[in-house]
Amino acid sequence: MQEFGFPILSALVWVPIIAGVLILFMDSKQRDLYRGVAATAAVVVLGLSATVFFTYNGIVADALNETLDEHYVEYDDPQDVNEREAFYAASEANYSAEVQALIATGSSDATVAFTDTTQFRETHKWVSELGIAYDLGVDGLSVPMVLLTGMVAVAGVFISWRIEDRQKEFMAFFMLLVAGVMGVFISVDLFLLFFFYELAIFPMYILIAGWGWKDLREYASMKLTLYILVGSVVSLVGGIAMVWAAGQYFSTDGAVIFMKASEAGILRDGASVYSFDITQLTLAAENGAFDVPLFGTTFAKFWFPFVFTGFAVLAGVWPFHNWSPDGHVAAPTAVSMIHAGVLMKVGAYAALRVGIQLLPEGAMVHLPWMIFLTLINVVYGAFIAFRQRDFKYVIGFSSVSHMGLVSMGFATMNMTGMTGAGLQMFSHGAMTALFFGCVGMVYDRAHTRDIPSLGGFSKKMPWVAVAFVVGGLTSMGMPGLSGFIAEFPIFQGLWVASDTVALTIGSYTLTNYYGVIALVSALGIVITAAYVLRVSGQVFFGDFDAKKFPDVGNITIPDRIVLLVLGTPLVVIGLYPQIIAPMITVGLDPIARLIGG
Amino acid sequence: MLFDLFGQAFSDKNLMPWLVPFWPLAGFALISLLTLLLQFLQRDFTKPLHTIPATDHNYGGHHPDYDGMDVPYQPFWFRITAIVIGMTAMTLTLFFAWSLVFGALDDFGAGTFGKIPSAEQAVEEEQAAEPEHGATSDCEDCVYQSNIEWMSLGESSETGFRIGTLVDPLTSIMLFMVPIAAGMIFVYSIGYMWHDPRQARFFALICLFAGGMLTLVVADNLMLMFVGWEIMGLCSYSLIGFWYEKESAYNAAVKAFTVTRVADVIMLLGIVYLWSLTGTLNFRDILYNTETLQMLGNTKAILFGSWGLSASGLIGMLVITGTVGKSAQFPLHVWLPDAMEGPTPVSAMIHAAAMVSAGVYAVIRMYPLYVGLSNPHAADPTFSAPLLYMAIAGSFTALFAATMGTAQRDVKAVLAYSTISQLGFMIAALGIGAYIAAAFHLITHAFFKALLFMSSGSVIHAMEHGEHHVHEHHAHAHNRQGHDDHHHDEHGHDEEHFDAQDMFNMGGLRHRIPVTFWTFLIGGLSLSGFPLLTAGFWSKDEILADAWNGTTVHGSGLHMMVFWVLALAAFLTAFYTMRQLGLTFWGDARTEEAEHAGLGGPYSIVSVAMQAPLIVLAFFAIVAGFIGVPPDFPILGSIFSPEHNFFHNLVVYTLPAMANGGAEVFHVEAPPVRFFPVFMSVLVALGGLFVGWLMYWRKPLKAGQADPLIRIVGENVYTTLQRRYYMDDLYDWLFVRPFRWVGINVIKLIDKGFIDGVLHKIAAIFIWIGDFIKTLNAWLIDGVGDGIPKAIFGFGGWMRRTQSGRVQQYLLIVLLAMIAIGILFALSAGALAIG
């Protein structure tokens, strides 16, 4: 759908790429020129992503209101109107008889919902022979992520404003990184998704190895790259297997469904049975194409752990989290921000989109045990963060802990819990980027990150202190800030799932343990409060030693822009979550249908 | 849209509750923005604020809390503006809150307010009612309420958040108490913080604090209540640690926040569980819905369900944990005594008007949930798990804290323990079903405890003033001896720090600050439950009467236990109050500082602003009790409650008549006045006061004299009491140290040791394989590889023979090659087309 008269999603990817290439050809002495280009590109990306966000929000809101008005007459009490249900009912009714016929032979609820919610679609031929296309689109899950990427891009450019060492190259690679990350969120083609996924890793490696903290950068960049590459290769193999299995299905049993779906216009024009189109794979998943036997189990059950974990490595799932704290600490500030803020969400997003959406059967079998891994993430990360002396390691491990909550939300396998996970992805992204920004600003001026030797910085850097405290309160789930909005549904999802989810190991069946998991993970939140207080107390309060830190002064205007861009959404969403929650539920609807949540 | 609603809120009482917390919150925002504005006005805003020494004349010269520090310069107009904003906000809040309270009494009247219509009535009204947005103005539920959708979750609106406000009888009594108590605290703060360099920050935070409390009070659902609950937690943190340069203050703040946070997270789990079962958090949806309550009571809890715990029992236990934390009940009481590290108005706010009251309020709010299917008033009373827990924990805390209160040296510490103890009274009362008595005590306690804290603050301020005086005197003496370089900043280095809060440094203050003395006395007597005259007597008496009623009528052991434990605690309360009064005000000054204590003359701003609120609160500390006099009480009953007990009759309609199973649990009659409980409550009050008088008033302590209590209880017991039964040390061993150990060792053993260890092993294996292949490469592949060039070389030698030098031959070869390629292309294109 072309709402804007120009391909807005392509612009999101190509603006930073073009800017990055342009910067590479500039004179490295003209700092203001290439910094300006980078800043302009980042601001344009933020503007475009905000446009996408608010337009999408408007679409969702309109859909809600229309159906609300229609249904008003039938109910005495408008508050009892089941608004969401009505929305889907109405949107489904819009589909023609062809879709009805399709439903008669197979099922297509989830696929239709997915096509329906995927907006601003751009489809161009690319490698048609292999079923690969340049296919962009955003749904309710990716729209917040797109906005987040835009925010962090702007913040990253402005916080790197004062880098002295090869700034030109830094900016160029940073732009490529932004493009790669953005691309993952807006791909509707599985191959394109992998393409952007790998595209993001390459500049990441260079940026950490070239501009990172000297003591650790080579080790950390290598560790990070290996972890992520191995993970993505495993997922890629799984993805190709899925395409193959779906193709097999559509050319035999599912031929009718495929034909009907093509006629109904759900699938890409002229798609072959073997296609990387996520819509088509969703249709396959929905109709049981992945239930074929494989290695003594079914295809979905076999591949799910590999595909899910392969991506979840990037989301820092235990025990594959170890790259992340080292990587975060070694990376320069802007890269830490985009890394913890967005790249970890790329992992979670891809795990959800490819792992859970395309292999729902596998998810239902495996997530009930994988939730223990996420629980370890939450508590374990918090414990470690609690005892770190290095300011940046504290934040690094806190990311591990908070990303555990995201995966935990996925593992609830119901709408509420997953909505919480979606909210947590956005909330944590902005929050942790804010944290890393604060750490960077302190480190730049104090030249040390050793927490006990810092102190009293709120007197010299009140903005940073306030921002850090806001971020800290968000991370400990203070109501009125976005962290609470995210954690509450996750816990609710856990309680709700507690009755239904059971885990069978051999002859023993474990039931009702999700409630226990909620209780234990609450411990993680308590510890979060403890370390946030400890760090903010030691770094920002107490006495300031002016002799020890002669360079510490108030922060510059670009720094303030960083804090504002990242801090504002935390408060806005905390106070008025309705701005983002509906679109996430809309985006999760197909997945919820697939896993019966 | 929003502005319209805002305008409507001024006239529509259903919307008006939103305004109550709005003003203080807006005040907070405004003062914070002003601070920012000040940065712009003063100088280049990229640089930090201009700082001056805290001891600058601008700030009154003397600050024990800012020893030798530089603080941002705040001009006088700015400080006044902060005060004006804060006071305006509070006045507006008071106005709207009270117009709601009295409006409700006027519109509905006590006895109707809060009642829900009977079933037939409800059906009729439902048919008549037109669907419209917002709330209806007729007396459908006989309360003021409105709500909005805040966040949709899941597929249907049923699982989304709705937030809204509700004014029912319980809210209304809180709306009566909180704004006036908080307002008085604000007035008092003008005086107390008059010279403080961070006064604007203080007003901003205390506005936020009041806003949080009022949000909690007007909330119509657990969600919004929790929001207010957490705002207060945050404010208590920032305000207890207000003088964060002082390590003890900062530690106290962290402790308060961490302890309450642990409780809050557990409470949050309870809220979430409740929601996952009912799909709503609205109080009236849950509490007035017999089916829901029955469902909750009959559902097995997901944890401990096999032990017979019902869902409502589990939710109750989880949510009560939040109360235990916030209201400082055993075993989470440890934060409250330390919380007095903050400025005294904050202590008054925490201990009286806001924070701790919130815990008890929350329990009363959700009371039917805790009662579950049990009935503490039945002939054969039954107690659900939360009730049992509250009865035991509450009465234990009441006694436990009272014993600690008897041995404290710090004037505020005594009050802190009395707060814990009095809250124990309320929680214990809730445990035995006496929720109206608990609400009554909540209100009276808030008034006299705010009074006591602010009086003690006035004492401390007076003592600091005396200290300042003495200090200057000494400084002059030093100067005469030639120490010209002596400066305020070095205060504390050259002499031992004087503790202005230690009661043993006081004595005889009744002459120095008479107004404070009288108000303190009134507050103290009210706390002790001085018979007939004071508010504390009536509320405490009602708790004891309820407990005794249960004991005699139902023969319940739990009621009896509560009665005797609380009676003993009440005795100790009276005793330590008298001790405190004696040590502080009676006798002669024991130190030079106490001799010069004062508030800077009777008509100084500080003196007036700090003592006027005391008088207002002293008034309430007396009369607040008369709204709840039992009607059958001899003489006084017929004066104050001619028809029925006003308070009882108002508050009883907060809850539905029937709980579940059809038993009348909540609309029980107030217990009849019996001789024995009244006698007991008079006896313990007067007895405690008498013993205190005997020990501390008859022969006032001289300077350097030890506490006579030591002679009676012995040194060991005394120290144990003073050290709070070593609870802090125990917690350090139980929680703090193990947590640290785990934190350190998890990374050492698992992260760096195991996971990275394995990873590095894998890396080593790969490196070994690499080396192996490299060797192999050199031997085998290179062998082959080197062979190939040799072969090519040989082939080249052979090919050289085609280089004949004849052009025609070359052209022929080119032509042949082109034809071959062309055929290949054609074939492949054709193949593709066919395929």
Image: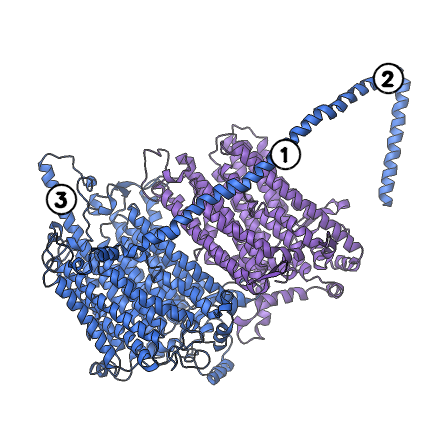
Chain colours: A purple, B blue
Query: Where residue A565 appears, x then y in whole percent?
Result: 47, 47
Relative vertical location of residue A484 with respect to residue A236 in this rendering, above or below: below
Of the image marks 1 and 3, the number of the one nearer the N terminus: 3
The chain that hosts pointer 1 is B
The chain that hosts pointer 3 is B
A291 or A376, which is in the foreground? Answer: A376
| Tags 2 and 1 both on a single chain | yes
Query: Where residue B762 appears, x then y in whole percent?
Result: 60, 37
Quadrant where the C terminus of chain B is found in the figure = top right
Give the numbered dot on residue B798: 2
**Distance Cα–Cα, label 2 vs label 1:** 44 Å
Query: Where residue A106 appears, x then y in whole percent?
Result: 74, 63
The kind of secondary structure element at disc 2 is helix
Instruction: Write down the residue under mark 1.
Output: B766
The amino acid at mark 3 is Glu
Relative vertical location of residue B724 with respect to residue B646 in this rendering, above or below: above
Would residue A417 appear left or right of B163 to someone viewing this image? Answer: right
Q: Residues within 10 Å of mark 1 (few under 14, many from 20)?
A: few
The amino acid at mark 1 is Phe
B614 or B15, which is in the foreground? Answer: B614
The chain that hosts pointer 2 is B
Which quadrant would residue B574 be assigned to in this image?
bottom left
